[in-house]
């Protein structure tokens, strides 16, 4: 069977694309969804069962449907969840909402045929305007005229070599914190050292405390920056004052001046959001590289803010001394006397300091481009079906999210969605952006099938 569309992936991008295809394609169409994650659509972020794990975007902006922006807020209200539209729901509730909306679409009689294939695509055997063929890890071949790659990104590796540490101590180095089985092995009084100070660190700190951990938590990151909090009450977006120049220094200076003149910085950041993709595309490659080298950490802590409840709990841990943040560059991890010792160079100093812990947890975030962690993408890169973008943020796509091969030729009917397209769109990892992209791709596929 040759499907009209194949959606490859299991996370939010995949469920968003599938939902839009079900709504926009004629009933005569056929869709295959290929993924090996039993929690389809919830991915890593929305599979957590801890209520304290909150969304960092207000409920009123978290609908899966771009044309129904209040859908998630309405779902919360009808289920008596007690979360106002400008409040921050639990990520578990959002995962349930996604599954609920997909189930409702599948119950409709007049819809496309949809097959879920529990497998992983490992190789692309043919990419052409007529047909795309993918080899699956169960040995079968999947053929489709349109394909949407929704593969997401992988967890970044620990930045130092730990292969020399063996036995029980090696098991105390958690390279992927989202495999939450490690939490049950941490004793309440043990010391935990977390590498990285971003949102992944926040999630793991909250998870530790929810599992009864009361010992010291030590956080090490290059700059020691923590995400800022959303305001307790709604802040309206403020249109940013931007210079004609697309020089990074001029852009940042203009935004800072606007805030110094009295504008709420949160409002300025929210007002910048609708313009971010266009501004990114107007930057030269040199200015994009400059942004990634120097401004990205500050962008992240202002742009990706914490729910007020989460921020207050993190602040309380800091004030109590249970949580301490260190600025520095990790150099080595060794095992000594039933402890792990992380050696690092404090920022601005030449000597080394050490942190001793019972556990070391890698929370340095996600790798920028998802090519390395995906056998399928590695094979497609080697064969020239895809091309890594020049900044290492993902793969090359055009303005319509169609994949570009190594020769710069657009591949008709072959799309990528979400974080893989960050090189083209930059702001494409959050729900409000992905849902717009998912609908746009579904509309293009519907137009392809109508020809």
Image (spheres, rainbow, N blue to C red):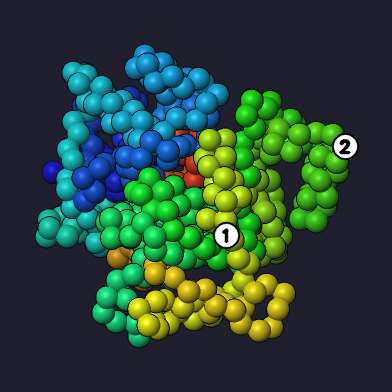
Residue 14 visible somewhere in the drawing: no
Within 10 Å of disc 2 (Cα), the crowding (few <14, some 14-19, many 20+) is few
What x and y, as percent, mark residue 93? 36, 30
Q: Secondary structure at mark 1?
A: strand
Q: Earlier in the sequence, mark 1 or mark 2?
A: 2
Residue ID at (32%, 76%): 169
Q: Secondary structure at mark 2?
A: loop
- Which label number is shown at residue 324? 1
Residue ID at (79%, 49%): 251
Within 10 Å of disc 1 (Cα), the crowding (few <14, some 14-19, many 20+) is some
Residue ID at (20%, 21%): 107
Q: Where is 406 relative to 234, above or below?
A: below
As drawn, is 143 to the left or to the right of 376? left
Q: CA distance from mark 1 to mark 2?
A: 34 Å
As drawn, is 72 to the left or to the right of 15? right
Q: Where is 63 relative to 374, above or below?
A: above
As drawn, is 133 to the left or to the right of 374? left
Q: Quadrant of residue 443?
A: top left
What x and y, as percent, mark residue 382? 36, 71
Residue indicated by mark 2: 261
Instruction: Determine contact: label 1, label 2, CB under 8 Å.
Output: no
Q: Quadrant of residue 413?
A: top left
Q: Quadrant of residue 181?
A: bottom left
What x and y, as percent, mark residue 100? 28, 26
Residue in front for this viewpoint, 271 or 131: 271
Tell me the quarter of the image containing the C terminus. Answer: top left
């Amino acid at each position: 069977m040759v499907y009209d569309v194949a959606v490859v992936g299991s996370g939010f991008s995949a469920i968003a694309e599938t939902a839009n295809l079900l709504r926009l394609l004629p009933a005569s169409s056929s869709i295959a969804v290929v993924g090996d994650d039993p929690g389809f659509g919830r991915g890593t972020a929305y599979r957590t069962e801890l209520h304290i794990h909150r969304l960092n975007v207000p409920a009123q902006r978290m609908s899966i449907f771009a044309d129904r922006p209040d859908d998630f807020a309405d779902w919360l209200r009808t289920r008596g969840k007690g979360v106002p539209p400008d409040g921050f729901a639990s990520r578990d509730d959002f995962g349930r909402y996604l599954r609920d909306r997909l189930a409702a679409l599948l119950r409709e009689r007049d819809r496309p045929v949809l097959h879920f294939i529990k497998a992983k695509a490992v190789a692309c055997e043919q990419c052409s305007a007529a047909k795309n063929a993918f080899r699956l890890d169960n040995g079968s071949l999947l053929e489709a005229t349109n394909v949407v790659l929704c593969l997401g990104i992988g967890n970044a590796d620990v930045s130092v070599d730990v292969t020399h540490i063996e036995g029980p101590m090696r098991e105390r180095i958690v390279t992927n914190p989202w495999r939450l089985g490690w939490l049950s092995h941490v004793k309440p009084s043990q010391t935990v050292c977390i590498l990285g100070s971003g949102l992944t660190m926040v999630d793991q700190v909250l998870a530790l405390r929810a599992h009864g951990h009361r010992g010291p938590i030590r956080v090490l990151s290059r700059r020691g920056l923590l995400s800022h909090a959303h305001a307790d009450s709604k802040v309206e977006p403020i249109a940013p004052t931007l210079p004609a120049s697309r020089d990074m220094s001029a852009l940042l200076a203009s935004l800072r001046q606007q805030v110094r003149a009295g504008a709420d910085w949160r409002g300025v950041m929210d007002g910048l959001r609708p313009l971010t993709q266009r501004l990114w595309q107007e930057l030269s490659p040199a200015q994009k590289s400059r942004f990634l080298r120097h401004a990205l950490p500050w962008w992240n802590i202002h742009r990706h803010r914490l729910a007020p409840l989460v921020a207050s709990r993190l602040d309380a841990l800091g004030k109590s001394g249970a949580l301490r943040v260190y600025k520095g560059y990790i150099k080595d991890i060794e095992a000594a006397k039933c402890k792990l010792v992380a050696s690092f160079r404090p920022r601005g100093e030449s000597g080394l300091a050490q942190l001793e812990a019972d556990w070391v947890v890698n929370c340095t975030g996600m790798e920028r481009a998802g090519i390395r962690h995906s056998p399928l993408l590695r094979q497609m890169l080697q064969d020239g079906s895809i091309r890594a973008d020049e900044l290492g943020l993902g793969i090359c796509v055009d303005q319509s999210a169609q994949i570009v091969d190594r020769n710069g030729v657009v591949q008709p009917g072959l799309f990528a969605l979400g974080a893989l397209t960050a090189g083209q769109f930059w702001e494409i990892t959050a729900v409000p952006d992905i849902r717009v992209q998912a609908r746009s791709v579904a509309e293009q596929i519907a137009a392809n099938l109508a020809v």
